[in-house]
Amino acid sequence: MRRIPNLADIAGLALLYLGGVAFSCLLCRADGGVAMVWVPGSVLAAWLYTAGRERWMAGLIACALANELGAGLFGLGWTAGIGLSLANMIEAAAAAVMARHTLRTHWPHATFEIASGFLLGAALVIPAGSALIAACTVHWVVGGAFVPTFRDWMLGHAVGLTALLPFAVTAAIRLDRQTRAAAQRRRAADQRTASHRPIASTLMVLTMALLTACVFLQDLRWPLVAPLLFALFAAVWADVLIATAMPMLVALIAAPLTMAGLGPIAPALIQSADRLQLGLLYAGVIACCTLPVVVEQARRRQQIAMLSRSAAHFQAMSQRADTLIDELRQAALTDPLTLLPNRRAFFERLTAQAQSGERACLAMIDIDHFKRVNDRFGHAAGDAVLRHFADVARASFRSGDMVGRIGGEEFAVVLRGVDLDQACKICQRLVDKLCDTDIATPAGTVRVTISTGVATIGSDGDAAMAAADSAMYEAKRGGRSRLSSVA
């Protein structure tokens, strides 16, 4: 069901194409021949560019019928309309394939080569092929002259593809992206689309329209360079959609004024058809000059955007890497069960404390008969006891002190800025508090006691550790749940 074309979309395309046919046939014909500016071909090519291949047949058939209707009502008649419709459909399909190849396959690489290939195809190869079919049809069906028909068709369609197709394709791509973005916003409210500076874009369009009108409403020829310079300025600084619209504006303004005999290039020719062609050639020159610049600027903007995204990505990766390094460093210095500093972290702190010369004490703490807890209640209960002790110890000492787990049930504390008597009083409160506490474990309530040894920290951290360890074992030999100290 997803492959069935949207009938409303196809009908809208056919009506738009019919309007373009009516415009070209009514306003852009000279001496009853073929239209000398062909607008609907670029519209159809742009639609084919964005549509899926499964929808091409429906769109081409609908536009062929619209072309036949327009030719019968406004152009060379119903019979000639068959051949002209065939030529227009082949031209639009070929232009869409060319645009897909240049934009989707190679973009944003080989910019000037792609622009040159696009201009060669749009201004020469594709219009020449469709002009051959059209000229043969007009000559055989209507009896028109082959060479003038071929010339007028090729020039009108070349200008249409060169001046209008880049803008039409860009507009179709922009519309397709905005439609998808709107659908995404409906699915996720936080999606946003980028602003394209509508005020500046509108001012540039109005400036080009006013500038072109002023140039072609007077007779001096040197101002003819002004629209070209402004189009080049827009190609460098404006959005792609606005930059590709500049040659189209020139064609829409310069060609009718020149055909009416106004402007600096009209007096050189007598025939209105010749004046119209000269005005179209002027717009085509502007399109050929500005398109490579537009393509190059679009490539640079895309590369800058990619570099910006890459820089942001690498910055985020660097920040994440720094975070991971900090997390790994913290994990390497932390006991995973109790979340206390581990043996390595504690000894680093003890060494630094001994080298600082600050008054401090060291306490060694061992949970009494911890093996019995594991044997009787299981290791889950033993882990609960260790975690409970860590919580009580953290709450019992100051923030400047350091409690660390240095063995299975052995812990150590660095107490800063205290003498031996003060350290013993602080540690005795922990001994008394723990022996009166019921510890909830998966196997039931458990009570434990601790034996503590306290020693002063001099210039040798290892000596202080040995002294505190000796005092702790003295407390164990004295009956456990005790505290012993050594100067």
Image (tube, rainbow, N blue to C red):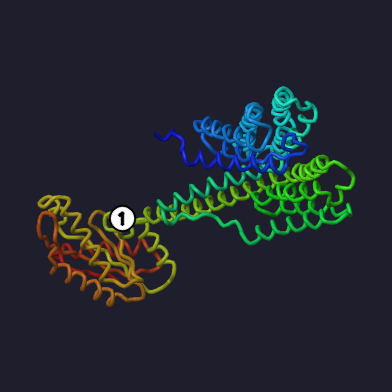
Q: How many marks do you count on the picture?
A: 1
Please determine whether, in this image, residue 344 is positioned above or below residue 140: below
The residue closer to the viewer here, 268 or 453, is 268
Between 79 and 162, the one lying in front of the other is 79
Q: Is residue 17 left or right of residue 36?
A: left
Q: What residue type is labelled 1?
A: Asp
- Which residue does the image show at 35% across and 69% down from the upper left? 457
Whether residue 297 sits left or right of residue 466 in the image: it is: right
Q: Residue at x 69, y 56 (%)?
A: 205
Query: In which quadrant is the N terminus drawn?
Result: top left
> How far across and down, in percent of the image, does residue 364 sit?
27, 64
Quarter of the C terminus within the rendering:
bottom left
Residue 452: percent from the left, percent from the top? 22, 66
Residue at image coords 80%, 49%: 260
Viewer-side residue, 396 vs 85: 85
Q: Which of the 4 image quadrants contains residue 211? A: bottom right
Q: Residue at x 44, y 49 (%)?
A: 183
Which one is nearer the viewer's eye here, 449 or 66?
A: 66
User: Crowding at label 1, few (<14), some or many (≥20) Cα neighbours within 10 Å?
Assistant: some
The percent position of residue 409, horizontal first and vertical second, equals 22, 56
Left/right placement of residue 284 relative to residue 8 reads right
Which type of secondary structure does the marked residue at label 1 adopt? loop
Quadrant in the rendering for residue 402: bottom left
Which residue of the protein is positioned furthest toward the top in this rendering? 140
Q: Give the labeled residue for mark 1.
A: 335
Vertical placement of residue 25 versus 254, above or below: above
